[in-house]
Image (cartoon, rainbow, N blue to C red):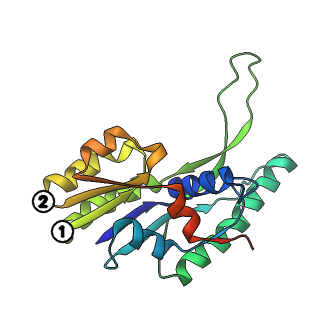
Amino acid sequence: MKVLIDGENLRHQLAYILHEHGKLTGKNAYFSFDMQAFLSEALRSDAIEPLYYTTRIKQPREHVPVRLQKQIDAISGANRRWVADLTNGGVRVIKAGYLRVRESSACVHCGKKTLVLQEKGVDVRVATDLVTSSGADKQVVLVSSDSDLIPALETAKKSGVYTYYLCYAGWLNRSISSAAHKTITFDDALVLKHFRGKK
């Protein structure tokens, strides 16, 4: 069974839970996590093929404020370690998009624009693989709460694939849940069980 994971989406959910329980100081902090065991237990199956979609960090060509550059460097370093851990744990990592610096919309109060980090491309690749892999797989699990993936999930379902939606119980997306055959949720206890700590 293929498990298609919107990496930043899932990692954000995990970090949120760990932060709420005092295990992390911030959502971008590096932590070690047994992803393979977590997914196997959540899905109650050892016959899984996890595909973790993540971004390449695109360093800005133009000058950015020191604070933002430090944030980019911190995210980049944590991402490298996280990807290495996943790969060593038997999870296939697919670099599918970019995390890049862009200018924000103007503030409605002062008109000022700032530089922010934006992810691009991961949802498109997940959707593409969800549709194209559906012919070969009888079961596919989507691990993302991004509503943009609903059409791809419905296409896979129509092609005869049994579709699962896996998410954190506190952040269930009802539209995605309705589009999938079955929804499986995980709770804080399962995340804490597979947390290996900070390094």
Q: Quarter of the image holding residue 25?
A: bottom right
- Outermost residue to the front: 189
- Outermost residue to the right: 66
- Which is nearer the eye, 22 or 4? 22
Residue drawn at 41 percent across, 70 percent down = 41
Q: Identify the residue position indicated by label 1 in the image.
A: 138
Q: Mark 2 Cα within 10 Å, few/some/many (few <14, many 20+)?
A: few
> Which amino acid is tagged 2?
Gly
Q: Position of residue 140 (x, y in %)?
A: 27, 64
Q: Position of residue 145 (x, y in %)?
A: 43, 47
Q: Quarter of the image holding residue 105?
A: top right
> Which amino acid is tagged 1?
Lys
| Cα–Cα span, label 1 and label 2 | 7 Å
Question: In which quadrant is the C terminus drawn?
Answer: bottom right
Residue drawn at 79 percent across, 48 percent down = 68
CB atoms of marks 1 and 2 within 8 Å: yes
Residue 165 visible somewhere in the drawing: yes
Residue drawn at 56 percent across, 68 percent down = 193
- Which is nearer the eye, 3 or 16? 16
- Which is nearer the eye, 48 or 121? 48
Q: Is residue 150 left or right of residue 6?
A: left
- Which is nearer the eye, 79 or 37? 37
Q: Is residue 140 left or right of residue 74?
A: left
Q: Mark 1 Cα within 10 Å, few/some/many (few <14, many 20+)?
A: some
SS at circle 1: loop
SS at circle 2: loop
Q: Identify the residue position indicated by label 2 in the image.
A: 160
Q: Is residue 92 left or right of residue 59?
A: left
